[in-house]
Amino acid sequence: MAGKTRLRDPGVSPALELDTLIHERVRLAILTALGSHGSLSFNELKALTEATDGNLSTHTQKLENAGYVQAAKSLFGGRSKTTYEITGAGRRALMDYLQALERLMGGLKATS
């Protein structure tokens, strides 16, 4: 797995279970957008994440390198179009991340 993941240890803070690759705001926005919408074009992702071209390119590349998203390039009206889709590994990593957040929030609620 590409990001930082730890096995559940009752003595360890759930915050340490969070996948550091996903934890970055734009990458989390990319994965949740793709998880909700299926495949999205670069421009659609840009609009949904409010990222700049360069920022989105950097973050999608990191997610691609981790195997969390895949890109497909095609020609549309004589212009290059890149479409992104979350992979099975990306969906599992996102679900694991969200479960770790739930454990973290549950622990915080229990102490208040």
Image: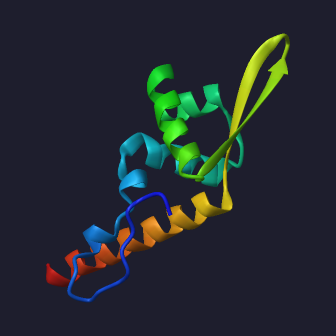
Residue 43 visible to an observer of this rendering: yes
Which residue ends up furthest to the top in the rendered image?
Answer: 78
Residue 70's place in the image compared with 81, above or below, is below
Residue 48, quarter of picture:
top right
User: Residue 61: percent from the left, percent from the top?
Assistant: 54, 37
Residue 90, quarter of picture:
bottom right
Residue 66's place in the image compared with 92, above or below, is above
Observer-nearest of 40 and 90: 90
Which residue ends up furthest to the left in the rendered image?
Answer: 112
Residue 72's place in the image compared with 18, above or below, is above
User: Residue 97: percent from the left, percent from the top?
Assistant: 43, 65
Question: Which residue is found at the position 44% from the left and 67% from the top?
Answer: 98
- 20 lies left or right of 73: left
Question: Which residue is found at the position 52% from the left and 68% from the top?
Answer: 95
| Viewport quadrant of the C terminus | bottom left
- 2 lies left or right of 77: left
User: Residue 23: percent from the left, percent from the top?
Assistant: 37, 53
Which residue ends up furthest to the bottom in the rendered image?
Answer: 10
Q: How many marks?
A: 0
User: Residue 54: percent from the left, percent from the top?
Assistant: 47, 22
Question: Which residue is found at the position 75% from the left and 18% from the top?
Answer: 80
Name the image colouring: rainbow
Observer-nearest of 57 and 99: 57
Question: Which residue is found at the position 43% from the left and 73% from the top?
Answer: 99
Residue 1's place in the image compared with 47, above or below, is below
Residue 50 visible to an observer of this rendering: no
